[in-house]
Image: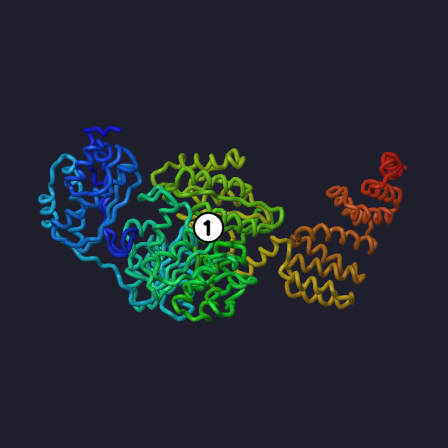
């Protein structure tokens, strides 16, 4: 491996000032990224000689280009930082160095007290290291450059005077932040929070934009009269600026998965977890670290924090629950369908049923259920009253007002009649898309389709884009590309879509329609959706435009009750399933009719209740009164399996009241749809007999009997019996 002498041997690629706690220190630090190709490629004897000259004892430089050489370079850089600091008047300095993303890259970090001097030290590293490589020691000259530099201001990291919670994670941090803020307001505290959407005070957006870094912390904690601060803390903010506060009372880490890898020197999920853990390292010893017990990387963060552990997990038998309680911590989990707090030596504290927490979509959204657990634990850890936590969980809805862009669900008229469900969600990575598809499948009626507007920002790896395409192809029935023109981030739209198509092809999807905007993607999907279908849009940059268009098309945001009804319907059930079952348990036909009439009167436009009312009348011998109710149920869009049964029962009632021809016509249609239904054949035979077509009726019954029989005689005479039946039809 030989270094090109025309290229610089030492390059100071970046000097970055981190304002607060960061990946390297729990206080403000400077981060210097160095490229050292000359050092990496130099002969081993030359590097060993350099080590002796600068007083670096122990260890050998290793062969040129080797991993050992890269480790050696970190020691050389650390020595350079310390020598420069001492020469320029700093006697004690925290310094940490680590290998970078490429073999010749080293990252050095050191605590700073004056911004200007810290920058000057970082830039002085280049000339010093270049001089050492050439056999020259320029410590004195470079130390003079540092001391002559404008000292600059001191760190301004905030020490909070009110309770503060920091929230991070790959998925769910914005929803958890918003929910925790809502609980704070429910508790009567003046609450402010910052997130990737902006700065919000008492539920009102005061500064839109990405405020998941120190600027958001300052805006929240400087808000007049603020009593509680919730700070979403994103990967980018931690790496580029550090944290905006010196400490927090509660830290929340939702999860860690592959996202934004290959940026700012973070190439693996383990490295990303190290970044996310920063917020737990500054949590007060009297505070709580709220950690996902089902994510091993997150749960391991308990070992690096002074705070007590508070684990959240959907599984009450998770090992992390036992570990947290054994360490004197807490757990929050699901126990018999209830959100429940566990503490050592205490009875379980059941806060609220999952079905009463709207953000969980009646328990359908597992990731939002986890977010609810995290927010509840954080709220209790902050000392908020239990009643306020319960009320906050019960009143936070996943709509565009309280949680914009996160699983916002709408009911929209379908072009061909009936209605469709539209879900708008960020779904920015694999876990997010899987969660979106889980919800979509949980809301579609049996037999309906899932349509997806697939779109991502350009700062994702090729592998992640292809994986997202594969998930989309496997789990959605129809896919269109819905691009985000403002978030291409260095990619072309064609390149981004190419990788999505590679993944789609793995799932057997040969081609998709391409739309240049998120709104255009939604507009392409909706006209093809039919009654009961679900349309999903991965939306980030055009939330306002999408919301306005949906409203113009008659779409209405779903309430918690609407979502619960859809979930039940998707299971083939009804909201009043228990009441319907009780109705049919009544032995007295008249009492059953009264109960059915009363239930139907409460919801006169409900197709299923109209059907049950008709069925009760039919069973009581009131066929004439049942007929219009059967027709009403069908007209209201009664779904299967009740729709098929209603048509059979309507035909039977028509025959009983003397309308045999109408009955026969309807049953003939049903027989064509389900030619092997014995019930349809039997009812049709009765209607045919009443119409004076007894031979045809007998023929149909013979065919049905022979088709379904399996005894030896039937099999022996099957052909003959079918032939005789055909003769009867033509006699």
Q: Quadrant of residue 527?
A: top right
Q: Is residue 630 above or below residue 190?
A: above
| Residue found 28% across the figure and 49% down from its top | 240
Q: Is residue 31 visible?
A: yes
| Residue found 70% across the figure and 57% down from its top | 611
Q: List x then y, in percent, for residue 407.
A: 48, 53
Q: Quadrant of residue 731?
A: top right
Q: Is residue 139 above or below residue 386?
A: above
In this orientation, which residue lies closer to the viewer: 532 or 503? 503
The residue tagged 1 is 425
| Left or right: residue 133 compared with residue 326 | left
Q: Is residue 492 above or below residue 655?
A: above
Q: List x then y, in percent, for residue 91.
A: 15, 54
Q: List x then y, in percent, for residue 412.
A: 54, 52
Give the number of marks: 1
Q: Secondary structure at mark 1?
A: strand
Q: Is residue 730 visible?
A: no
């Amino acid at each position: 491996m030989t270094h090109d002498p025309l290229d610089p041997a030492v390059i100071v690629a970046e000097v970055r000032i981190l304002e607060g706690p960061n990946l390297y220190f729990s206080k403000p630090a400077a981060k210097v990224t160095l490229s050292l190709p000359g050092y990496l490629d130099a002969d081993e004897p030359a590097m060993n000689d350099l080590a002796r000259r600068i007083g670096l004892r122990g260890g050998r430089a290793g062969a040129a280009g080797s991993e050992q050489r890269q480790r050696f370079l970190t020691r050389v850089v650390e020595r350079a930082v310390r020598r420069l600091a001492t020469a320029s008047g700093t006697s004690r300095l925290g310094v940490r160095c680590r290998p970078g993303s490429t073999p010749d890259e080293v990252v050095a970090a050191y605590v700073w007290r004056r911004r200007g001097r810290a920058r000057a030290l970082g830039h002085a590293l280049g000339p010093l290291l270049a001089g050492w490589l050439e056999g020259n020691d320029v410590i004195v000259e470079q130390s003079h450059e540092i001391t002559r530099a404008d000292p600059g201001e001191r760190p301004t990291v905030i020490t909070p005077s009110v309770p503060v919670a920091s929230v991070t994670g790959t998925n769910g941090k914005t929803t958890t932040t918003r929910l925790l803020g809502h609980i704070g307001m429910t508790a009567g505290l003046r609450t402010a929070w910052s997130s990737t959407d902006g700065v919000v005070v008492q539920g009102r957006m005061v500064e839109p934009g990405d405020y998941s870094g120190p600027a958001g912390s300052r805006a929240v904690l400087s808000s007049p009269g603020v009593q509680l601060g919730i700070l979403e803390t994103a990967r980018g903010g931690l790496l580029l600026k550090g944290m905006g506060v010196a400490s927090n009372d509660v830290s929340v880490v939702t999860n860690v998965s592959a996202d934004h890898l290959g940026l700012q020197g973070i190439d693996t999920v383990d490295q990303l977890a190290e970044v996310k853990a920063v917020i737990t390292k500054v949590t007060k010893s009297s505070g709580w670290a709220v950690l996902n017990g089902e994510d091993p990387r997150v749960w391991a963060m308990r070992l690096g924090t002074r705070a007590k552990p508070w684990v959240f997990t959907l599984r009450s038998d998770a090992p992390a629950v036992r570990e947290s309680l054994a360490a004197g911590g807490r757990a929050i989990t699901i126990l018999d369908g209830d959100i429940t707090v566990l503490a050592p030596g205490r009875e379980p504290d059941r806060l609220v049923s999952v079905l009463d927490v709207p953000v969980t979509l009646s328990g359908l959204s597992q990731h939002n259920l986890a977010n609810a657990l995290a927010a509840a634990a954080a709220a209790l850890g902050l000392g908020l009253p239990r009643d306020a936590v319960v009320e906050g969980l019960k009143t936070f809805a996943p709509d565009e007002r309280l949680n914009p862009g996160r699983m916002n669900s709408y009911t929209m008229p379908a072009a061909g009649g009936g209605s469709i469900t539209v879900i708008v969600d960020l779904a920015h990575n694999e876990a997010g898309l899987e969660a979106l598809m889980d919800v979509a499948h949980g809301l579609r009626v049996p037999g309906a389709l899932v349509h997806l507007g697939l779109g991502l920002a350009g700062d994702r790896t090729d592998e992640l884009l292809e994986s997202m395409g594969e998930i989309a192809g496997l789990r959605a029935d129809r896919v269109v590309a819905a691009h985000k023109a403002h978030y291409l981030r260095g990619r072309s739209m064609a390149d981004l879509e190419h990788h999505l198509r590679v993944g789609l092809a793995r799932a057997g999807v040969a081609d998709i329609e391409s739309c240049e905007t998120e709104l255009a993607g939604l507009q392409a999907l909706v006209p093809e959706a039919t009654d009961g279908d679900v349309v999903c849009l991965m939306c980030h940059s055009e939330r306002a435009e999408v919301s306005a268009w949906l409203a113009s098309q008659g779409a209405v945001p779903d309430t918690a009750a609407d979502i619960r009804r859809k979930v039940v319907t998707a299971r083939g059930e009804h909201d009043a399933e228990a009441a319907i079952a009780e109705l049919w348990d009544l032995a007295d036909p008249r009492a059953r009719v009264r109960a059915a009439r009363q239930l139907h009167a409460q919801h006169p436009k409900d197709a299923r209740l109209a059907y049950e009312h008709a069925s009760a009348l039919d069973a009581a011998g009131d066929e004439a009164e049942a007929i219009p109710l059967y027709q009403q149920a069908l007209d209201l869009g009664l779904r299967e399996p009740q729709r098929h049964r209603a048509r059979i029962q309507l035909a039977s009632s028509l025959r009983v009241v003397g309308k045999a021809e109408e009955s026969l016509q309807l049953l003939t249609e049903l027989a064509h749809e389900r030619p092997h239904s014995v019930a349809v054949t039997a009812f049709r035979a009765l209607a045919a007999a009443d119409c004076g077509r007894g031979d045809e009726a007998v023929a149909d019954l013979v065919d049905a009997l022979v088709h379904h029989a399996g005894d030896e005689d039937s099999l022996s005479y099957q052909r003959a019996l079918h032939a005789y039946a055909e003769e009867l039809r033509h006699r």
